[in-house]
């Protein structure tokens, strides 16, 4: 129990980690990343969530946010690299760091935080197409229901049992960024999946 005069600090902590290579066929592969979100903010439906997203999903999200934020400068994504190597750990680590910084900067803006597509992107396992449909009210479930049910009826077959809370950075909607750069720059394991 906290004394009445003590205000609990609101926090939003996010990390982008666990890159996985997906081989669709001999000519098509992609990498996705786990987004770990932990928060006590009332802006979010769940206190903890884990979803996997591709770089192209982040590009889509930024495009969506741009449509709602005509007068504000949007955070930048790490640049697209035509020579991006899935086996180059430094490139993968740099991209993860850039994606994480993008999300941390998005969390600093209340206007961006009000976009339901952002919440579905971070807290549901819906595909981008289904996120768009849900945000437009064209699904049999609401945004809140999609987020609450993300681990059951709307979930993908990906195993999300590794829900350890080792996020290395945090952003507070009131106090700005607090980043442990040394931990974030440490080498990351690179996992392959079929």
Image (cartoon, helix red, strand yellow):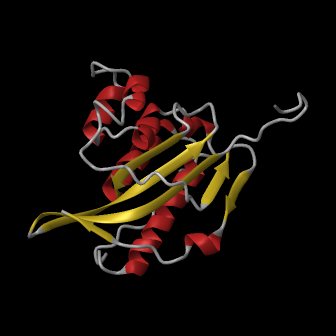
Quadrant containing the C terminus is bottom left
Q: Is residue 86 above or below residue 194?
A: below
Q: Quadrant of residue 135?
A: top left
Taking the image as shown, residue 71 lies to the left or right of residue 85, namely right
Residue 95 versus residue 90 in the image, above or below: above
Lateral position of residue 21 relative to residue 16, left or right: left
Q: Is residue 142 above or below residue 52?
A: above
Residue beneath the point at 45% across and 39% down: 118
Answer above or below: position of 51 versus 192: above
**Residue drawn at (43%, 47%), measured in percent from left and top?**
50
Viewport quadrant of the N terminus: top right
* Residue 166 in picture, x, y percent from top left: 55, 59
Compare residues 193 and 107 and report the one nearer the observer: 193
Left or right, 169 with reference to 34: right
Residue 183: x and y in percent read 60, 71
Residue 127, can we see it?
yes
- Front in this rendered view, residue 63 or 70: 63
Does the rendering let one see residue 76? no
Numbered-mark total = 0
Q: Residue at x 52, y 57 (%)?
A: 15
> Which residue: 68% across, 56% down?
177
- Residue 127: image x %, image y %? 28, 41
Horizontal side of 157 relative to 106 (left or right) equals: left
- Foreground pick, 102 / 100: 100
């Amino acid at each position: 129990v906290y004394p009445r005069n003590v205000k609990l600090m609101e926090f939003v902590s996010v990390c982008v980690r666990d890159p996985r290579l997906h081989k669709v066929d001999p000519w098509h592969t992609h990498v996705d990343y786990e987004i770990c979100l932990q928060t006590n903010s009332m802006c979010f439906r769940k206190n903890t969530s884990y979803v996997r997203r591709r770089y192209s999903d982040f590009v889509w999200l930024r495009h969506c946010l741009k449509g709602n934020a005509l007068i504000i400068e949007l955070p930048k994504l790490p640049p697209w690299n035509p020579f991006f190597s899935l086996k180059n750990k430094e490139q993968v680590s740099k991209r993860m760091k850039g994606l994480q910084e993008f999300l941390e900067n998005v969390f600093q803006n209340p206007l961006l935080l009000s976009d339901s597509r952002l919440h579905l992107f971070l807290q549901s396992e819906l595909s981008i197409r289904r996120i768009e449909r849900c945000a437009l009210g064209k699904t049999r479930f609401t945004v809140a229901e999609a987020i609450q049910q993300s681990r059951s009826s709307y979930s993908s077959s990906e195993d999300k049992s590794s829900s350890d809370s080792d996020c290395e950075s945090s952003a507070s909607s009131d106090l700005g960024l607090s980043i442990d750069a040394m931990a974030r720059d440490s080498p990351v394991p690179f996992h392959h999946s079929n």
